[in-house]
Amino acid sequence: MSVHVLNPGGASGGGSVGQLSTIVTRAQALLGSTLDTPLGSDFDNDQWPVIATGGTGSTNMNTTARGGVITMTSGATAGGTAQMKPHGGTASHVSNPAGTRWYYMARAAVTTAIDAQTTANFGILNNGGNPNALIGVFGSVSTVNFTGHVVTNGGVTTNVTTVGVAIDTNYHTFEIWCDTVNVTFAVDGTQLGSTPVANIGTNSAFIGPFVGNGATAATRSIDIDRTYVVVASN
């Protein structure tokens, strides 16, 4: 994935200094001033991440959208998927999701209808395994409201839907953060709820948005305008 690193007051790689400063400010307000390093992309250039697709899934730059938007789609054949990964597919954005403080955000939209087979989410995950900390649509557990979702190293899943925020096709700001006590999920500033860090694992994780249609032969799509995780510098 195109990685931009910003310490407040400077920038490298691309993206908006003002936007990145806002993201860092939000992370620091939640978790403290040591979170100073945003890793991710505004998709404002053609430094594409690794794309992993299955079936008829595809990922494309939406060239008509302002500022750069990635469109990911399952295609209309059942079993279609699309996922983005960092370059190399093994980079670590969060070294220990349960034991460190981190903040994740995505400005994104689920742009098609969904059903109980649909998976459309944003967050961090381990390469080909666990843990996961994700927010979005997760099949039958979230056909009405967006859901928070964590998975331990051993594959035990916990879904968080304490407060309902309805699924629609509009852009939203999806957030996940960990203070080493709880993992908390929010949509447009409304907290869906939290779950103890015991419900998430310690293996390293990276940003990895995903969309899939399961057994339904219909297109499921997401648009991603930006996605970042903010951590403390090394």
Image (cartoon, rainbow, N blue to C red):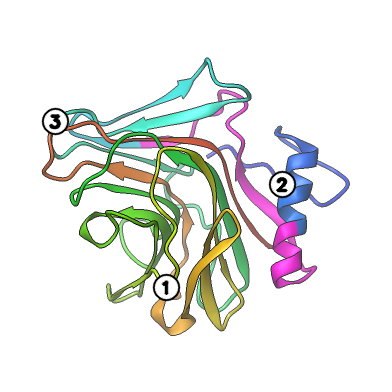
Is label 1 or label 2 in front?
1
- In magenta segment, residue 184: no
Q: Disc 3 marks which residue?
A: 77
Mark 2, Cα crowd under 10 Å, few <14 / some 14-19 / many 20+, is: many
Instruction: Say which amino acid is labelled 2.
Output: Val
From mark 1 to mark 3, how far is it between C-alphas? 34 Å
Q: Which residue is drawn at 72% across and 59% down?
A: 26
35 drawn magenta: yes
Identify the image quadrant of the C terminus.
bottom right
Regarding residue 196, the answer to whether it shows in the image is yes
> Residue under circle 1?
162
Give, as a single range, the part of the protein colored magenta.
26-51
The local secondary structure at tag 1 comes to loop
Nearer-the-camera pick, 118 or 101: 118
| Callout 3: SS | loop
Q: Name the residue under label 2.
A: 5
Q: Which residue is drawn at 42% across and 29% down?
A: 71
